[in-house]
Image (cartoon, helix red, strand yellow):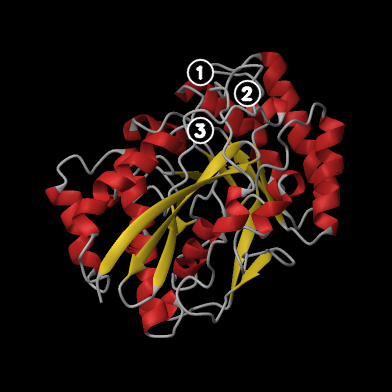
Amino acid sequence: MKVTDIRTYCVDANWRNLVFVKVFTDAGLTGVGECTLETRDRSVMATVADLSRYVLGQDPNNIEKIWNTMYRDGYWGTGPVDMSAMSAIEQALWDIVGKKYKTPVYNLLGGKVRDKVKVYANGWYFGLKTIEEHAEKVGELVEKGFRAFKWDPFRISGRDISHEDLEYAVECIAAVRKAAGPKVDLLIEGHGRFNVHSAVKVAKAMEPFNIFFFEEPIPQDNYQALKKVADAVNVPLAGGERCYSYYHFRDLLAAQALDIVQPDLSHSGGILSLKKIAAMAETWYVGVAPHNASGPVHTAATVQVDATLNNFVIQECFPCDVEKCPWLHTIVDHPPVPVDGCITLSDRPGLGLDIDEEEIRKHPPQNRPVYSLYSPDSFLLTGVGATNDESGF
């Protein structure tokens, strides 16, 4: 069996576009992957085309060999765009191999240690203007069965946080806790915005609310500074979504600054890389809560690995995207949908789903403004921004 073609597909998905990859073989088997990289759609699609030259004609069974050829022989295969493209191709190869052996990918990774994967909802707060709206929305989602929520309550705060923004954040957390109840997990997103002093101040202020974890309290590129925050607070810290290699996680784990690491399968190398990162984390007794701000293929691939991890904690997902883009459940044939706060593992072979190319074409990608996360026009505060200008796609 040989790889004969690799194609990319881009589709509108509310606040970003999704990018899928499909790998074709001469045996008639195909596999899908995802390399959604917000604001880098064109770059990652072009990189998939460049990397295809290393993959065409290869036996898709040889995943380690192909991955290392792209990573080592490709020379530049260490940046987020390259790693995202590689990750999608790697996912698709696993999908093909699973279909060949008529078994889910998790059975090729050591088998399941759980039948259901606990998830938390993200994105539900985009565009909400008041604390009351946050509380009301969480109440609705609790009624729908969700038992864990993440959000960024810090508005336009940057490196420092003002007294007003800190007061707002604390009141928002308190209101959401009251609406959700004591048994629901609350996760606070920092988006890497704070300096050490502000991160410590914020973390101490949220200690009374039994926070599940505080994510990316400071920028991701100084592990020693992150350790200073960890040593000063009593809130569990999480991070690592912007680490795009298991070599980065080696250094991050050695810093002993995090309680939970958040590798992103679609940016850090793919399915086997996530498995390797989790194994490293296990040696430090650190949990794994994979990042996922992408679409259904990414979700399906990640839960295949989640099912096999002894140190798995919780999985991110964006269920509220479907409210604005209902086609996210029709562009694939078997979308992974949370029920009662969990995704049940599929017994279908490979990743358990395929993309619908005709349906994808009905929802072309949008050119979106480039937002700063810390400005009044951020999609976190406005909800979504898009034009109907499809130029460049």
**Amino acid type for the residue under numbered disc 1:** Arg
378 in relation to 36, above or below: above
State how far apart marks 2 and 1 are (Cα).
16 Å
Per the rendering, the mark at residue 378 is 2
Q: Horizontal and vertical percent for residue 362? A: 64, 48
Describe the element under mark 3 as helix, strand or loop: loop
Q: Is residue 342 visible?
A: yes
Per the rendering, the mark at residue 159 is 1
**Amino acid type for the residue under numbered disc 2:** Ser
Q: Horizontal and vertical percent for residue 265? A: 42, 54
Describe the element under mark 2 as helix, strand or loop: loop
**Residue nearest the viewer, comparing 6 with 73:** 6
Circle 3 or circle 2, nearest the eye: 2
Q: Quadrant of the N terminus?
A: bottom left
- Pointer 3: what residue? 217
Residue 177 horizontal side relative to residue 292, left or right: right
1 or 3: tag closer to the N-terminus = 1
Q: Is residue 263 visible?
A: no
Q: Horizontal and vertical percent for residue 146? A: 74, 58
State how far apart marks 1 and 3 are (Cα).
10 Å
356 in relation to 103, above or below: above
**Residue nearest the viewer, comparing 33 with 111:** 33
